[in-house]
Amino acid sequence: MASSSTVLQFHPSATIVSARVQPVVLFNICDSYVRRPDQAERVIGTLLGSVSPDGTLDIRNSYVVPHNESADQVALDIDYHHNMFSSHQKVNPKEVIVGWFSTGFGVSGGSALIHEFYSREVQNPVHLTVDTGFRNGEASIKAYVSVSLSLGDKQLAAQFQEIPLDLRMIEAERVGFDLLKTTNVDKLPNDLEGMESSMERLYALIDDVYKYVDGVVEGRITPDNNIGRFIADTLASMPRISPAAFDKLFNDKIQDNLALVYLSSLIRTQLSIAEKLNTAAQIL
Amino acid sequence: MANPMARSFLQAVASEEVASPLRVVQMEGLTVLKIIKHCKEFSPSLVTGQLLGLDVGSVLEVTNCFPFPIREEDEEIEADGANYQLEMMRCLREVNVDNNTVGWYQSTLLGSFQTAELIETFMNYQENIRRCVCIIYDPSKSNQGVLALKALKLSDSFMELYRSNNFTGEKLREKKLAWVDIFEEIPIKVSNSALISAFMTELEPESPVSQCDYDRLNLSTAPYMERNLEFLIECMEDLLSEQNKFQYYYRNLSRQQAQQQAWLQKRRQENVARKAAGEEPLPEEDPSNPIFKPIPEPSRLDSYLITNQVANYCNQINGVAGQSFSRLYLMKALHDN
């Protein structure tokens, strides 16, 4: 009895619980959107990356796939997709297809068709949408997985279910946001300039802490235990060294560095002398 | 009527020939990130890739790039690599990416990039494209909060010399080419599209501290310094052996000259004797004699390159030591407080 009845049910395909997007993917999508063909409204493409055992998806790379979209049909350049994928495989075999992206807000009608195509390429593809039009007045980037609704063995529909998306940009932090945020940077910061700005920021932070502590002591600011604990922890993290030991450590380090600077300057001088002598020595 | 027109056209062509020198390399943020991603993923092995972009007057715009697979010493695979390159260019053209090659990028270890291979690659590229650039990225330096991105090209006078493959001391002196003149560093500008800038501003709230700051203020520089010194010592040894080569050459040269003098004197005495006896004098030169065979002068290219490397290591050590000083004084100030 039970076996003959047909059951209406969702097949959650959720092995992927959350996704992380690397900034380079976002940059690539934006760049390809800017370079899209005249009549195209959106760009779509393939996402590459890997799935970690705990279900987090790491989207590490992407490429655009040309497509044609009319009212009710979508034509994807499948050859292009395969060519590009095999090219990417040659460079980094660890990055496999994990899904696809599209610009625009949310999921649109044609998306189900494209999603079906990617379902054949990989199990449980992820659909990433990037709203390049800023339709809500904010940058909405969303990731979806599909859940299929079936009646018995028959597929009825697919539902897109949003999954949490991690947009922390660890890589970008190393490069510096100043470089990636503005439209034009004239000069890359060199070592010492970077150091200077870091120190200035540290100084400003210490200053803030001072102000806060003074404010609390004088009763102007209501004390917050959490902040107090943070400050105490920070102060405690400084190792206790007796002044004499610290001085010795400090002087040793300074001397090491001085020796290195001396050595490198010596070599540089040597090089320039050698060059002068070498060119002179040839006039025999 | 047509004549002045034609002339002006010719003139236009002629004036086109004189290209303004390359002043700035303008990179897209996308390219910077792509290069970093590729270089970092494969670090410490060294990787390369191709740069695509546009040549606009004195600015070279690098708008995109793609990585090369790790090269293997197999002919079949090498052909495969060329196919890959063409395929990739074709694919990228289809999605409206600039598909002019403007150079290549490569990762490096502690800035040890000044090699003969780099020069060779550069010359290869230079033959096909007039303006090309090599972007060097050092993944090991990014751990210190420094974006070690450099754009290099070979200087024109060096390329001229390299083409004639003539690195004797005399030629170098003639051209006044010192070791510092081999590579020219070009300043890099970074640009982003307004769209990306909007996204980044939206997604990344202004935070007072970034990873970069932590990295920069990290006190431990010893491992980096140690490796730098190791490399430096190796280079010095190489330089020494190069210098020995030259000394050997000069010793040989002076010995040969002494021999030639001795032979000439002998010949002259002989000739005087022959003249006194009323015979024909013998010629004062004898090409068949081995002592007149010129000794080839060793090329100075290697020693120039090594010198460049040494200077590079010295600069790095100096730079890091300088930073380390400021960090130490900062720590002292903090500690005293």
Image (cartoon, coloured by chain):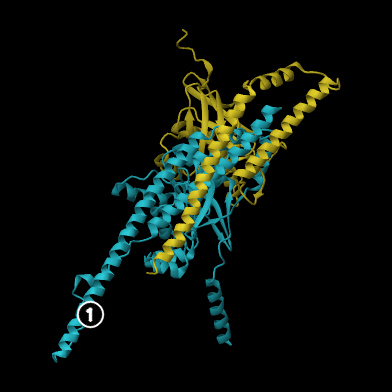
Chain colours: A yellow, B cyan
Instruction: State the image coordinates of residue B230 (x, y, percent, origin top left).
Output: 42, 40
Q: Residue at x 33, y 59 (%)?
A: B247
Q: Position of residue B291 (x, y in %)?
A: 22, 70
Circle 1 packing at 10 Å, graded few (<14), some (14-19), many (20+), is: few
Which residue is labeled 1 in the image? Answer: B285
Res A176 → quadrant: top right
Give me the residue at 57% from left, 29% from top.
Answer: A249
In the image, residue B238 sits, relative to residue B125, either above or below, namely above
Tell me if residue A77 comes above or below residue B298 in the rendering. Answer: above
In this rendering, the answer to whether B113 lies above or below B337 is: below
In the picture as drawn, the residue positioned furthest to the bottom comes out as: B278
Left or right, A205 with reference to B42: right
Spot occupied by residue A211 in the image (x, y as percentages of width and height): 79, 27
Which of these two is toward me, B264 or A49? Answer: B264
Name the residue rendered at 29%, 46% in the picture: B74
Question: Of B208 and B183, which appears nearest the observer?
Answer: B183
Report in which chain the residue with disc 1 lies. Answer: B
How far across and down, in percent of the image, does residue A126 sit? 53, 30
Residue type marked 1: Glu
What number of labels is visible? 1
Foreground residue, A153 or B155? B155
Could you say whether the residue bearing mark 1 is in a helix, strand or loop?
A: loop
Question: In the depicted view, which residue is nearer to us: A92 or B231?
Answer: B231
Looking at the image, which residue sits at the far top?
A1
Q: Is residue A228 visible?
A: yes
Q: Is residue B64 above or below residue B218?
A: below
Q: Quadrant of the C terminus of chain A?
A: bottom left
Q: Is residue A21 visible?
A: no
The picture quadrant where one finds residue A157 is: top right
